[in-house]
Image (cartoon, helix red, strand yellow):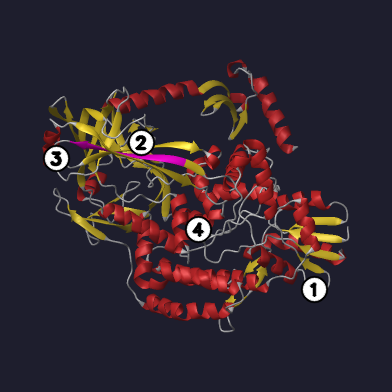
Amino acid sequence: MGDNLVIVESPAKAKTIEKFLGKGYTVKSSFGHIRDLAKKDLGIDIPNGFVPEYEISSDKKKVVSELSSLAKKADTVWLASDEDREGEAIAWHLYETLKLSPDNTHRIVFHEITKDAILHAIDTPRNIDMNLVMAQQARRVLDRLVGFELSPILWKKIQPKLSAGRVQSVALRLIVDREREISSFQPQIFYRVEGVFIPDGAKKALKGVLDKKFDTAEEAVAFLEKCKNCDFSISSIEKKEAIKTPAAPFTTSALQQEAARKLSFSVNQTMAVAQKLYEAGLITYMRTDSTNLSSLAINTAKECITSMYGAEYSKVRNYRTKVKGAQEAHEAIRPTYIKNTSIEGTSAEKRLYNLIWKRTIASQMADAKIEKTDILISGSNISEKFSIQGEKIIFDGFLKVYIEGKDDEEQDENTTLLPQLSKGQAMHNQAITATERFTQRPPRYSEASLVKKLEELGIGRPSTYAPTISTLGKRGYIIKGDRAGVERKYREITLQESHISEAVKSENTGSEKSKLFPENIGIVVTDFLEQHFTDIMDYGFTAKVEEDFDKIAAGKLVWNDVIRDFYTPFHVKVDETMQDRAHTNAERVIGTDPVSGKTIIARIGRFGPLVQKGTSDDPQKQFVSLKKGQLIENITLEEALQLFELPRKVGKYQEYDIIAAVGRFGPYVKYNSSFVSLGKKYDPYTITEAEAIALIEEHIKKESEKYISEFPASKIQVLNGRFGAYIKQDKENYRIPKNTDPKSLDEAACLAIIEKAKAKTKK
């Protein structure tokens, strides 16, 4: 082999680096961490200062053996894992496990995979930073201690197979607390008044909003009565120039939020795509809390902006991050070659790269100049005023390239383009409308807004957000989903041509898309941990632990002292809770069944949340599972009783009863011995006989069209499937080649297709 062995953590990164280093260098991947805390027992020697007991992962033994062999033959070994704490820890584990020598081992780091960056790293090697390693080790040990000691308590007190985590449990609490805010929210009614006016001598109508809201319909009507004989005119026009500045280049959390808003990417998807872009040498390192850009990047951006848009669009900016513990030596996420406006790759890679390029370029562009106009319209009989806001762009600046997205709870200003107007100008009233409105409940968290909140609270770090949200979903504590919303009636009172009229209209309210909802078990776990482990669930306490990790990384604290200060009181609380014999199942008495007189109880059962009719000692008690989205803590008696209505007789099809029910694979209707899925369109509690018959007949039609031909001797069937026609032999399925008519296939043709497919598989 060559004189130099370079070890990185991923094969894609190895492939990119090898292109730049060329002859004399062998680049190999460790495929991530090669060892971790021992799985047997705790893997931590608590009495002797929390010393971790590491073991080589079973799937990495072959990799370690190969790397060890190559390292012995190499003149120089270069440890080139990522530049963050996790990467530093990987380098240290490689150094220890491969028994490398300090004489011929060098640690190199770079935040972009470019030839210049890699060659510069080789020219300026350093030692492994043990402060960073110890900070990572402290996080790993602390998380193992919390998970290892809390999880058995949850198994014993609530339900088997549950887990708790230092960051994940706090993130779960945020989601649960928000759900409770929503459940307890009581909307307040008010009336918002808008007027439509045509300026004297103009044709285009303008809409103004009254500067006062009314609490009741009576107050709104009284105001409209006053407006009947009003003469309206412009009482003031105020123009002012405003400046909009671009957002800073992307940090990890900012990228996760913006990719969710603009590209509808999950946090996990954003990080996976960004990792591929980084390893291909297209962007800088994707785990960073810095908004800093290198002088080379700033100068390249300036050249790019000047040539594409003109010198007036360029403005050099240096950003400083506001995140605690951020490492300014690192860079923000940016393209490695800013002049590359596009890349080759998958659709997701192209879209994310484009977002990063635009944000980087915009951050180095001139401010946008906006002229804002505020107009007040007065009436002769009223003291209140109507306000019209307008704006026009004088100079677009960075807006030519990029506008930062907003979360759905952030409202855009009500602005409009305005004609030429003057003070005192008469405004002819076309209509004034008072609309019944309702105060808005707090919004549920999306992945993006949850990341934003965690960052604001100082909980977790860029590398932890994606796995935290992913773990909550895998554990069944939360679900990401959509809600259709409900229809709501509202009143609209209108003054037009001196006549007041009233109408009742309807709107869909409460619809949500890709939001995070807590599941019942997530609520139970949160309540239990809040009751027994206050510190673990406290936002401020969790943020302080993160600050301690930062201090360890800076060499200001000793890692096992931090662990000891946390663990000593925590372990005492674990022992106390384990000795408490109480069991938690979130049982809630909802009410009494008016027919049987039995108690209705909602609780967590062995297979999930359920409603029980009858007390525990009742031999005739009945059980039924809660529907998706129903919560133990707020399900009503009416909703609970409805759950017992299944199975439900819907009507008849031919001579058979149609029965609606919910089974293992979801809601269905049954007739004779056939089952037809209701899918997402129909509810088993409300589906009508006509709807059920239509579904059944559609099912019968599909079944009749399913069989195209059959050859019993060869056990072959040609069938119509969900994705088109296919061949089935025994339990195996085979594709039919394109442009082949399934109806034309005879037995020999089918056998030929099967043999060809088998031969291809063997090859």
The Cα–Cα distance between marks 1 and 4, rounded to whole angstroms, is: 37 Å
| Disc marking residue 217 | 3
The Cα–Cα distance between marks 2 and 3, rounded to whole angstroms, is: 46 Å
Amino acid at circle 4: Thr
Q: Are marks 2 and 1 in contact (CB under 8 Å)?
A: no
Please give the name of the residue rendered at 36% of the width and 33% of the height, measured from the top-left corner: 681
Residue bearing the label numbered 1? 102
Amino acid at circle 3: Ala
Check the picture and name the quadrant holding the C terminus. top right
Number of numbered labels in the structure image: 4
Q: Nearer the viewer, mark 4 or mark 3?
A: 3
- Residue furthest toward the bottom? 47
Please give the name of the residue rendered at 48% of the width and 59% of the height, measured from the top-left corner: 455
Residue 548: where, in percent of width, then height?
53, 73
Q: Nearer the viewer, mark 4 or mark 2?
A: 4
First in sequence: mark 4 vs mark 2: 4
Residue 54: where, in percent of width, then height?
65, 71
